[in-house]
Image (cartoon, helix red, strand yellow):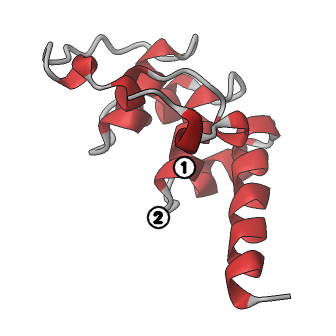
Amino acid sequence: MSHYKENIDEHYKEVNKALNTTDLTVLKQLLNSKSVGVRRALAQNNSINSEIANCLAYDPVLNVSYIATLNQNCTVKREFNENDLKHKCVICTIAEKDLNCTQCDI
């Protein structure tokens, strides 16, 4: 198996963990992921608590922070600039594991 394929497989394992785990310790660890995709997936997980959701709501990457504000456990109300929300990638709600950006019509 190529190194690239191993990295892709590992990334999707982390994405799936971020989307599906209910273990709060694991969820808190994933909050520090360097991967935008992992943090975005974490923001979509309804098992995150308000502390994690609120932290993700202020993630420096809009694709993460916007999705976090939509999470049922997010208790902060963050204002987004109208221009920020014009980009389809920011407001995309497709689960990270199902995302196929090559087929998006942006």
Residue drawn where x is 75% and y is 77% of the image: 5
The amino acid on which the numbered mark 1 sits, given as a three-letter code, is Gly
Between the residue at mark 1 and the residue at mark 2, the CA separation in whole angstroms equals 9 Å
> Going by the picture, which residue comes out furthest to the bottom?
2
Name the secondary structure under disc 2.
Answer: loop
Under tag 1, what secondary structure?
helix
Residue 39: image location, x then y, percent: 52, 46
Q: Position of residue 56 (x, y in %)?
A: 42, 36
User: Which quadrant of the view contains residue 82?
Assistant: top left
Decide if residue 13 is on the left or right side of residue 63.
right
Q: Alpha-carbon neighbours of circle 2 within 10 Å: few (<14), some, or many (≥20)?
A: few
Residue 34 is labelled as 2
Residue 101, relative to residue 14: is it above or below? Answer: above
Q: Position of residue 2 (x, y in %)?
A: 77, 89
Residue type for callout 2: Lys
Q: Quadrant of residue 21?
A: top right
Q: Which of these two is toward me, 27 or 91?
A: 91
Left/right placement of residue 97 relative to residue 1 reads left
Report the mark closest to the observer, 1 or 2.
Answer: 1
106 w.r.t. 61: above or below: above
Quadrant of image for the N terminus: bottom right
Residue, x 69% and y 76% (percent of image)?
7
CB under 8 Å between discs 1 and 2: no
Q: Which numbered dot is residue 37?
A: 1
Q: Nearer the viewer, residue 12 or 72?
A: 12
- Give the residue drawn at x 58%, y 35%: 103
Which residue appears farthest toward the right when viewing the image?
Answer: 1
Task: Judge from the rendering whether residue 85 lies leftward or rightward of residue 33; answer left or right.
Answer: left
Residue 30 versus residue 70 in the image, above or below: below
Return the x and y of residue 88 as percentages of the image width and height: 37, 24
Q: Categorize mark 1 by other alpha carbons within 10 Å: few (<14), some (14-19), many (20+).
A: many
